[in-house]
């Protein structure tokens, strides 16, 4: 039986995209990266709605192309002296002793170009995965899914996200109205005709939004006591300090290992406790709460499983994850399984709901 059109939970799409992005970050194999980009493109084409935010995927694709181009360009400009087969002998520009270890231009090798291309593809795949999540997930519903303790932040972000689409709609409406009237055709004078109606419409929308939020109780101070505020603040600051120390110890191999994983785990637990304590005094009601159903669980599981398989390939099949620059890259069965799991999201998820025009 075919499922009815509806928007999938935004967190499910983000978990799917994060899993594929994690798999892309753990390899420089161009074949795997191109397959991940292709899978993301197929899923976006099949499950993208007609809402305004769904049109942003093309921007992320061009941003990924620019990342590849710039990465290869940096290799050409700063990759002189890279060992390998020389394909273009460029003159090397001497630099002062202050920047020793950096060469400007110089002999360009095939391995240098391939290294820049592989790194650029990895960055492009991560960017495109994030763009897919932004195109598929409803940003308003995503921000409403924030913990109760962060409801003020979610409200501010929802307002910020809706400003640009509303401003665009105002411009289109004013442009259509002005096209029916005869008047000045110069760019400066025509801009003056558009500016005042657009600003007036924006202010009216802002006042209506503020009145609606005030009616629904946004901005209330709450009933928390001073002791509760101090407890919440201490938990949040302590958790943040633990996370900072844990991340620093993970990156610095000379730091004691007890400050790495254990301290990071303790910091996350303390910060989570602070969010829970702060959220208890926030009372929120939802007219239509977002529920997790079988398609949401399936999409999130597929993405996270793809990321886990990518981590396993990175650990157990190093020659596949990081191919040698002098040989043709190869793909293993595990990598193909990870990519296949990613594309299955287009099959298990319901078709998107169309916006009312």
Image: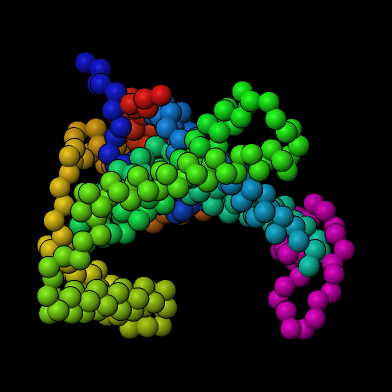
What span is colored magenta in the figure? 78-103
Q: Quadrant of residue 264?
A: bottom left
Q: Residue at x 22, y 76 (%)?
A: 233
Whether residue 130 is visible, yes or no, is no
In the rendered image, the residue lying farthest to the top is 1
Q: At x 24% / y 32%, what residue is drawn? A: 295
Q: Residue at x 72, y 63 (%)?
A: 79
Q: Position of residue 170 (x, y in %)?
A: 51, 37
Give the left or right position of residue 5, taking residue 280 as reference.
Answer: right
Q: Is residue 319 left or right of residue 234?
A: right
Above/below status of 234 relative to 179: below
Nearer-the-camera pick, 179 or 345: 179
Q: Residue at x 21, y 49 (%)?
A: 216
Q: Residue furthest right?
A: 91
Residue 239: quadrant of the picture? bottom left
133 lies above or below 50:
below
Q: Nearer the viewer, residue 172 or 299?
A: 172
Residues 357 and 201: in front is: 201
Residue 247, how many percent across, how many down? 36, 73
Check the image and report above or below for 38 versus 258.
Answer: above
């Amino acid at each position: 039986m075919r499922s009815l059109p509806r928007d999938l939970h935004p967190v499910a799409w983000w978990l799917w995209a994060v899993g594929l992005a994690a798999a892309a970050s753990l390899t420089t194999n161009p074949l795997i990266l191109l397959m991940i980009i292709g899978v993301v493109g197929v899923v976006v084409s099949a499950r993208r709605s007609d809402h305004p935010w769904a049109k942003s995927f093309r921007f992320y694709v061009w941003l990924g192309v620019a990342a590849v181009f710039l990465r290869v360009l940096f290799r050409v400009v700063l990759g002189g002296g890279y060992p390998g087969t020389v394909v273009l002998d460029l003159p090397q520009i001497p630099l002062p002793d202050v920047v020793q270890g950096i060469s400007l231009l110089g002999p360009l090798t095939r391995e240098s170009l391939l290294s820049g291309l592989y790194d650029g593809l990895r960055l492009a795949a991560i960017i495109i995965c994030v763009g897919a999540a932004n195109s598929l997930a409803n940003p308003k519903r995503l921000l409403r899914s924030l913990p109760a303790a962060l409801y003020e932040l979610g409200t501010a972000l929802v307002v910020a996200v809706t400003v640009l689409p509303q401003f665009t709609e105002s411009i289109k409406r004013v442009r259509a109205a002005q096209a029916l009237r005869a008047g000045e055709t110069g760019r400066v004078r025509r801009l003056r005709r558009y500016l005042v109606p657009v600003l007036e419409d924006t202010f009216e929308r802002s006042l209506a939004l503020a009145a609606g939020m005030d009616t629904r109780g946004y901005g209330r101070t709450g009933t928390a006591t001073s002791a509760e505020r101090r407890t919440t603040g201490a938990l949040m600051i302590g958790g943040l300090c633990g996370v900072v120390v844990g991340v620093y110890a993970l990156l610095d191999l000379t730091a004691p290992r007890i400050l790495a994983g254990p301290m990071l785990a303790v910091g996350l637990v303390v910060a989570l406790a602070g969010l829970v304590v702060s959220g208890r005094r926030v009372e929120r009601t939802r007219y239509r709460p977002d529920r997790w159903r079988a398609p949401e669980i399936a999409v999130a599981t597929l993405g996270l499983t793809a990321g886990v398989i990518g981590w396993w390939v990175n650990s157990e099949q190093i020659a596949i994850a990081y191919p040698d620059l002098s040989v043709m890259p190869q793909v293993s069965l595990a990598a193909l399984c990870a990519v296949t799991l990613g594309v299955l999201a287009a099959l298990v998820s319901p078709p998107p709901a169309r916006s009312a025009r």
